[in-house]
Image: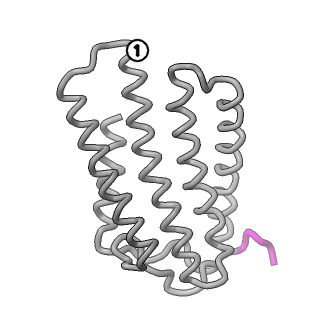
């Protein structure tokens, strides 16, 4: 049987490629452009991408649905961090070109604040198993593409949409 016969394995393989590319790019940015004004913000984006991608790709290797869920929670923390790093990158980029208005600063601070709240909820999910954001896999991670959504998952998706539209 092909390792790509399972949709979960195919999804993990694709995310694994993204993890590898983010790692290579992060090493390149670190070695060549970390002292540039946009180098550090880009490095933070790539580091958050690495957390998202490596834990998202390797959750299929979790021996139990619970461990796979924990890896997915860390992956979601990487997604929230990626959004926050993206906001930082946009802010640094814009500061070099145009003056930043009060409305933009307020929106970015709201983005940081909501992101911090989501990170704290995800950390609580990880540490105490509250399952507020991400519940457990309904079965083997080899069969199911994602764990079930917790009651706060809609907030995470809304945050992602807000930050994407803001950028």
Identified at 28% across, 51% down, the residue is 114
Q: Position of residue 34 (x, y in %)?
A: 61, 26
Q: Position of residue 147 (x, y in %)?
A: 48, 76
Q: Give the residues in magenta.
A: 1-5
Q: Nearer the viewer, residue 47 or 4?
A: 47
Disc 1 crowd, CA 10 A, few/some/many (<14, 14-19, 20+):
few
Q: Is residue 53 above or below residue 73?
A: above
Q: Residue 54 sits in which quadrant?
A: bottom right
Which residue is farthest right?
Answer: 1
Identified at 34% across, 66% down, the residue is 153
Q: Is residue 46 above or below residue 98?
A: below
Q: Residue 57 sits in which quadrant?
A: bottom right
Q: Position of residue 115 (x, y in %)?
A: 33, 51
Which residue is farthest left?
Answer: 103
Q: Circle 1 sits in a helix, a strand or a loop, which is it?
A: helix
Q: Please tell me whether residue 2 belongs to the stretch shown in magenta.
A: yes
Q: Position of residue 89 (x, y in %)?
A: 44, 31
In the image: residue 41, left or right of residue 22 = left
Quarter of the image with the N terminus in it: bottom right
In the image: residue 132, left or right of residue 42 = left
List the residue tagged with mark 1.
Answer: 96
Judged by its main secondary structure, the magenta piece is loop
In the image: residue 53, left or right of residue 124 = right
Identified at 33% across, 49% down, the residue is 161
Identified at 36% across, 42% down, the residue is 164
């Amino acid at each position: 049987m092909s390792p790509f016969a399972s949709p979960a394995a195919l999804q993990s393989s694709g995310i694994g490629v993204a993890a590898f590319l983010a790692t290579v790019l992060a090493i390149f940015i670190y070695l060549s452009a970390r002292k540039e004004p946009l180098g550090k913000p880009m490095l933070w984006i790539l580091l958050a991408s690495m957390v998202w991608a490596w834990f998202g790709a390797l959750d299929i290797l979790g021996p139990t649905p619970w461990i796979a869920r924990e890896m997915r929670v860390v992956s979601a923390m990487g997604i929230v961090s990626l959004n926050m790093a993206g906001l930082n990158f946009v802010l640094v980029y814009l500061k070099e070109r145009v003056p930043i208005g009060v409305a933009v600063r307020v929106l970015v601070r709201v983005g940081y604040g909501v992101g911090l709240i989501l990170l704290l909820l995800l950390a609580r999910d990880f540490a105490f198993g509250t399952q507020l954001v991400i519940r457990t896999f309904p079965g083997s991670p080899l069969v199911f593409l994602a764990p079930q959504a917790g009651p706060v998952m809609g907030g995470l998706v809304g945050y992602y949409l807000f930050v994407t539209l803001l950028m």
